[in-house]
Amino acid sequence: MSLWPAETQEMAKKLIGRYPDPKSAVMPLLYLAMRQDGYLTEAGMREVASWTGHTPAQVQSVATFYGMFKTERLGDYLVSVCTSISCMLLGGDEVLDAVEDETGVPHGETDAEGLFSVEHVECLGACGGAPAMQVNYELVEGSTPDQARSLCRWLREERPEAVNTDAMQEQFGGRRSFDWAITEDNSAVGPYPAFGPYGTLRRGDT
Ligand code: FES
């Protein structure tokens, strides 16, 4: 018998239906489990195993290999700062220092209130807009340390229910990798990648 509510079970069925073998749906289902519990609990990973036909150990090995699967509870806003070479050369370390100082949260930690989690990450694929950072995996490029501080203050004061890359870029970003030409009107709900089938995306917020 599933631990998940009916809505989450429906999402799981739809995700599994996209693959020829249920085992191939392990990663989407792990995101579903994260969204369900706030992070990957042992019970959540066992649930994924029962849906996909993997053993719990196999599910855990996938979950602990990839950095975007979290096995500890996150804050409402996961702030990820790139410190790989392009960003490091253009001030990524200083942006990370500013984020850690403004939030009071060091790399890899979450505050007691459950508002912020902070991490430094490897290349986000936005080197042309370095230094790059993300809030709940929504990209902000070219920020100065002061802009990064302002972004954190805005999150603390406004507590937006969803965050959107274009809106944050306009307010707190600088030079972008390139002109994306289209407006991104989807937003992320919670500290997970924003995908419709996972229930972590809000459409048409801007
Ligand atoms: S090095 Fe930071 S986005 Fe590539």
Image (cartoon, grey):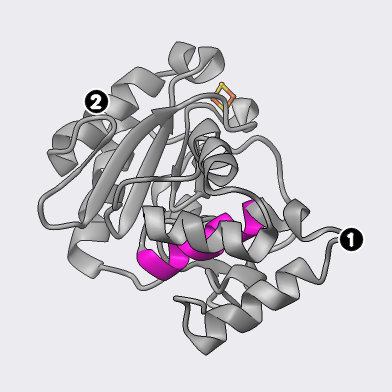
Does residue 56 sit above or below 183 in this rendering?
Answer: above
- Give coordinates of residue 185: x percent, y percent: 62, 70
Residue type, label 2:
Asp
Residue beneath disc 2: 97
Closest to the camera, between mark 1 and mark 2, is 1
Disc 1, ligand 1: is the CB inside 8 Å? Answer: no
Of the 4 image quadrants, the one containing the C terminus is bottom right
Of residue 77 and residue 178, the one placed in the foreground of this image is 77
Q: Quadrant of ligand 1?
A: top right
- Cα–Cα gap, marks 1 and 2: 46 Å
Q: Position of residue 66 (x, y in %)?
A: 55, 35
Q: Which residue is mark 1?
A: 20
Write down the region rendered in magenta.
27-37
Q: Is residue 123 above or below residue 155?
A: above
Question: To which quarter of the image does residue 81 belong?
Answer: top left
Residue occupying the point 70% across, 39% down: 178
Q: Residue at x 41, y 45 (%)?
A: 70
Where residue 102 appears, as percent x and y from the top left, is 16, 40
- How packed mark 2 is, by other alpha carbons closer than 10 Å (few <14, some 14-19, many 20 or more), is some
Q: Which mark is residue 4?
A: none
Left or right of 38? Residue 116 is left
Taking the view exactly as shown, the residue that stands out farthest to the bottom is 6
Q: Quick one: SS at disc 1?
A: loop
- Provide the major secondary structure of the magenta segment: helix
Q: State yes or no: residue 117 in magenta.
A: no
Confirm whether residue 204 shows in the render. no
Amino acid tagged 1: Pro
- Mark positioned earlier in the residue sequence (1 or 2): 1
